[in-house]
Amino acid sequence: MPEQGQEKKSWLSTFPGRPVVCALLLFVFINVALSAIKPNLQVKPTELPVRLSWEWWRTKSYLSEPHAPDVVLMGSSLMMIPTSLVEADFLNRNIDAVKHPHSTFLETKLQDAGAQRNISCFNFALPGAMISDQYLTAHSLFSSGKAPKVMLLGLTLRDFIDSGVDSATSTPTYQFFRHFDKTSDVKHLLTVSPQAAAEAFYNNFNYLADKRLELQAYFARPITRAGQTALAGIPVNSKFDAKEPQEKGDGNILGNATVTEGNFILPPHRVLPWKDNTREYKKRFASANEKLFANQVDFFDKLLADAKANHVKVVVVNMPLTTKNLSLMPNGMYERYMHEMVKRAKRGNISLVDLNRHWVFKDSDFQDTAHLNTSGALKFMELLAMSLAKNENVREALAIVSPPEQQTQTAASGRSSLY
């Protein structure tokens, strides 16, 4: 019996875990309330409080373009590096790979081939990108008047299988572009692994976790405005400089650190020493990863379907590799990859340019087993420009018209042996 004057306490008030229960109930309430109030909360991804990455910089540059670029180069570092290296040599000056997304070399070559106007070529290749990353990039950006006329995809087997990638959701590109909220139509492709499926289930249940960055950016706006109002009229010490120090990098544009201006300077005519990355690619090709390969092929077809809907011509470049890199691949997988490319080329879905020709590219053209060095990059870009200039679909899309004598030569030569 309680003493006189004391009220009988409920079981919840005496329950040892009451703080935990209350916190859980509050958590559920906030999740349900925000899900109902802001079910599709969206903020521009370039305004999100995220680590600056290649995806962030390229997206910001792409969205700031006055018009959609005519040609967008996509792929992994195998495409990104030679495009940037040639830029430094072509312009004969240092270039900041972060702030220089265009290929003026390719623009000039296509204009010289007979383009009736200035051509814009944008380098959207990303380090370590998979085919699913190419799809997410194009699906998020190539719409609303921002679709290019030509999509140039530099691909090889690694873009379809990589033992360091268990599903499309495990890449930095997905983590960035998922905030565009345009992934609902490929949810069945995103959950290829149990881990990805569990993560998707958790995000669907936990609004605060899934929309964490959007919520930070959304509520930062009124807080910032209130702070600006409160500080209005207060003099600011103009001598204070809060700029972050920027160190000159060694030109390695594949760094995992935050990507900042001035950290990836590429000098012209640079001699790149050979680096043996055999161990890295042994890990990447540790297994055939059949399930991921099939999943990435599905993403490839989604990418091609999007391109067709947006009237984008697709050119796939089979990237050059060393014989050493090819020898590290799971048995038969490179042939399967090439079979998928050739099959789509025969259907007319893509134009295929095979530059993995060992009588064209020697080991001396590479800086490691997969990436081209400066001289190899120039050879690659020249062959690429020549192949594009001879491609009838590309010429039509870019309004390239040759003088009469060149038209006769082109008609007589037929399709390039590189196709």
Image: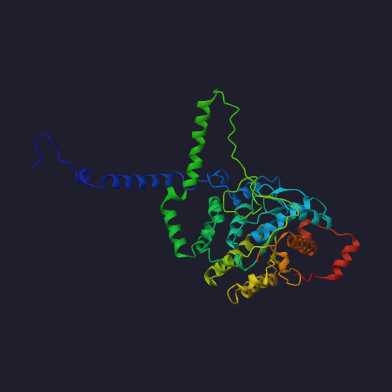
Q: Nearer the viewer, residue 14 or 408?
A: 14
Percent across and percent down for residue 368 are: 66, 64
Give the color scheme: rainbow, by chain, secondary structure or one colour. Answer: rainbow
Residue lying at the far front of the rendered structure = 273
User: Could you tell me which residue is drawn at 50 percent across and 26 percent down?
Assistant: 230
As displayed, is residue 184 above or below residue 337? above
Residue sitting nearer the eye, 36 or 209:
209
User: Percent x, y for residue 33?
Assistant: 40, 44
Can residue 258 be seen in this snapshot?
yes
Q: Measured from the top left, where is residue 283 in percent x and y?
A: 55, 67
What residue appears at the point 60 percent right and 28 percent down from the top-left corner?
239
**Image quarter hosting the N terminus:** top left
Q: Is residue 227 above or below residue 86?
A: above
- Left or right: 306, with 118 as reference point: left
Residue 209 relative to residue 22: left or right = right
Give the residue at the far right of this rendering.
405
Above or below for 343 versus 187: below
- For the C terminus, the image quarter is bottom right
Left or right: where does residue 277 sit relative to residue 191?
right
Q: Position of residue 192 (x, y in %)?
A: 49, 65
Q: How many numbered discs?
A: 0
* Residue at x-position 65% and y-position 74%: 339
Q: Is residue 149 visible?
A: no
